Image: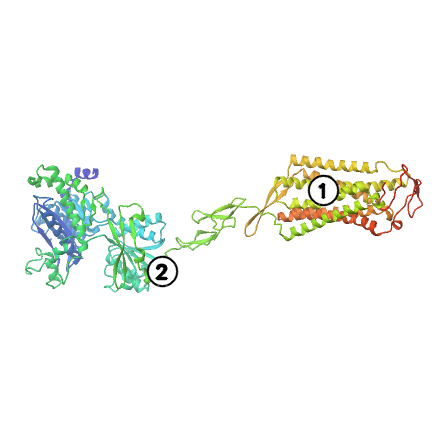
Amino acid sequence: MANINNTFKSKNMCVHSLQTLVMVLLVSRCVCLNRVCVSYSKTGDVILGGLFPIHYVAGPGQCTDKQSRWGTSLSEAMIFAVEQINSRDDILPSITLGYDIRDDCRSEDVALWHALSLVNGLNPAETTGLCLPDAKAKVLGIVGTAHSTTSVVVAKAAAMYNVPVVSYGAAADELGDSQRFPFFLRTIPQNSLQIQTMIDIIDTFGWVYVSLLHGTESEYLHGALRFQEIAPSHGICVAYSAAIRSNAGDEEILEVVSKLDRYPKAKVVVVIGEKFTGKNVMQAAQTAGMVGKYQWIGGFSWGYLMAEEGLGDISDGAIFVRSYSVETDGYQEYVKSKVLTEPHVSPWYQDLAAAWMETNNCTDIEVCPLTLSNSAGPVKDAVDALGFALHELMIEKCPNISHCPIGEITMDTESYLDKLFNVNFTGVDNEQIRFDSSGNAGGKFIITNLREGSGEQRVGLWVSSFESVGERLTLKPDLIRFVNKSWSKPLSICTEECEVGYIIVPLEEKCCYGCAECHPDQIVVLNGTECEQCNRMEWPDNTRSVCRPIIPSPIVWSDSIVIVILTMSGLGVVLSACTITGLLVYNNHPLIKASSRELSSINVASLTLTFSSCLVLLAEPTKVSCILAEMLLALCTTLIYAPTLLKVNRIFRIFTKARKSTQRPKFTGPKHQVIACLVFISVQVMLSILSAILSPSAPVELIFQTDDRRVELYCSYGACFIVSCVYNLLLILACCIYAFKARKVPSNFNESKFIAISVYSTLVLYIAAVPVYVTAAHALQKVATLCFAIILNAYITLVCQYLPKLYAVKYMDQQDDMSTRDWHGTFTLKGTNQVGPSTSGTTAVISTATGK
């Protein structure tokens, strides 16, 4: 109430000067020709003023003689409300209320001069040409007006005299500014609530792309600005907005409305304006062929007589926000009691209902019903607010309310205004009426659906006292028939329906969005507006909303390559077993004895281990399996080529020594050969152990992507594994060197040649396998490369070194293919004349090699 107190402190400033200036302006503008002036009054202890649009405006300061059914009904509602209070004993029991009702003709000028006459009475000398009543008493308060434009000037004029104004129809938000209008209150919801209702309806139906047409009057311009201000917070975009002047021609309106087709996806069109703005928009849309094309949403100012005006087809399916009102108890009976009396009496003092009947040439109120009974509620609430506030003030000021000096009470305007702002009573709709600091009382709205042929149907209710949309708005969607006579809501959205894995991206058109595909390894986040990269070991789920850990794909043992590897490995084990069996069966055969049985046994055992090691290589990679696989690869190669190196070295040394002497070379016996082989193997074992300690092999993810991301595990061998490989390479190269040196051994001693073929083939095979392994894209390819390399190497060794020997033992005549040694201490090389002594009195048989 601080603003009100400040107003009272400055209330006497220039009041007389302002009144004089206003009246001079009015008189200078008004030419009161053919103006119908209506003032209907009744005396009382306290007078309430009333301003109603009983006639229509004819021009500046002029009214027509056409009487408004709606305005007349509202004025009768005030009379009814005053009489109701006067008939009660519980409110103002010793006071009789009077009224002074004026016709503002919807004109700001007329409303202003009537307001000034009501609040302070006017000097007839200053109002020549104005129609004024006989009563000159100052009113306690004013009920009115019906429109925001007239209420603005009335509220300002009344504020100069500290007279409160309670409006039943002015909804403009600017009137809620307590700094400018400290004496203004209203019993209907302000426009911002109507706009919020429209927003809530649009939000509830999921319409996010709309068009907006509005009038240029201050009330509707502010409403449109308010709509555009709060729409974005609800995710609503105004694609097209245009103002329609009140005096715009048909072509101008048609041009504005036709531009709606530039935004065909904005199926919802909101129209904020007065009666004629809405009517003109509908006519233009009908002319432009928009019937059944757009979903119209309107406020409580227009859309009431669409069918009667030939606009039923274009407005079919429209949704309207209407003022909440209920039947006022007793009002209908009161109106029906009005009859035509003394038609010769001047309309100034004639009963307004009778004037309405006379104007419409009827003698029965049932035939030409005056009232829109649901409109009486806000008027009655306004009168009750003024009455209850006075009652509360009298209770506070007078110990005995029946003997209260009403003149002194009504002079205390500051206290009365305070009581008015704090009044609390039950309204016509059985809801509590109370005003906030801006003079607003909140309120409700009815949601209606206009159907061609059946009129408006109530489909919902909006209540301002709740916070959330779901609580404020109650709708019955199944009762709503939308545009084009459809029971399904239209889509009003300019966003494409994006598939899974796509995000919404803005297009060139305002508020329109298309779809852009995210990369396959990205998910969609932030309500479908951004792509987010999954981690290296993650992949989007089927909904593309969550990154899921990728489970590495194991090697499938049913794969054809794996089956080939396992088949070759199994066959190799069988052949190795057969070879071992043959060596055991022919253990004492000279040919077997000559090829060093001990080294051959180690060699064949290593071949069996090599064939079996594929099972470890194909197993699921773990730290243990990877270390074991590294050791097997290193040891198997050493076990194959350490004995082979010793054998070919022995052949070379024996034949080289034989050319110079018959004495046997040192360290060529089985014992020395086995010891040397174990030394070579021990070195590899030590290297493998050091490798496992210093840089152990471990599983590593192999990631590759086609349509999706796949992860495979394979064993990544440590850096020290290279030392083991170099060691084995040196063994193979040494074998190659000695095989090359032994190339001139007589053809009968051809084991060295088979060894040469074996090691040469192995060297070529490994040289080819290394780049294949390094460049392999899949884990199975890498593992298969290693498996095939060691299996083929084992097969080459088996075929080249042992198959000919066993074949010779089994099927060839030893006397034709062997060189024999003299049992008396000399040996003879077949095809040569070289003879030498034997060593240690033993007999040696030289065939494909030399042995004990």
717 left or right of 72?
right
State the image coordinates of residue 699 (x, y, percent, origin top left): 61, 42
State the image coordinates of residue 97 (x, y, percent, origin top left): 9, 47
Q: How is the image coloured?
A: rainbow
Eye-nearest disc, 2 or 1: 1
| SS category of the residue bearing label 1 | helix
Q: Amino acid at mark 1?
A: Cys
Q: Is residue 603 shown to the viewer in this render?
A: yes
Q: CA distance from mark 2 to mark 1?
A: 82 Å
State the image coordinates of residue 8 (x, y, percent, origin top left): 17, 39
Label at residue 261? 2
Q: Amino acid at mark 2?
A: Asp
Q: Earlier in the sequence, mark 2 or mark 1?
A: 2
Q: Residue furthest front?
A: 585
Q: Which residue is mark 1?
A: 636
Q: Residue at x 70, y 49 (%)?
A: 570
Could you tell me which quadrant the N terminus lies in?
A: top left
Rendered position, 529 above or below 55: above
Q: Is residue 129 shown to the viewer in this render?
A: no
Q: Nearer the viewer, residue 219 or 43?
A: 43
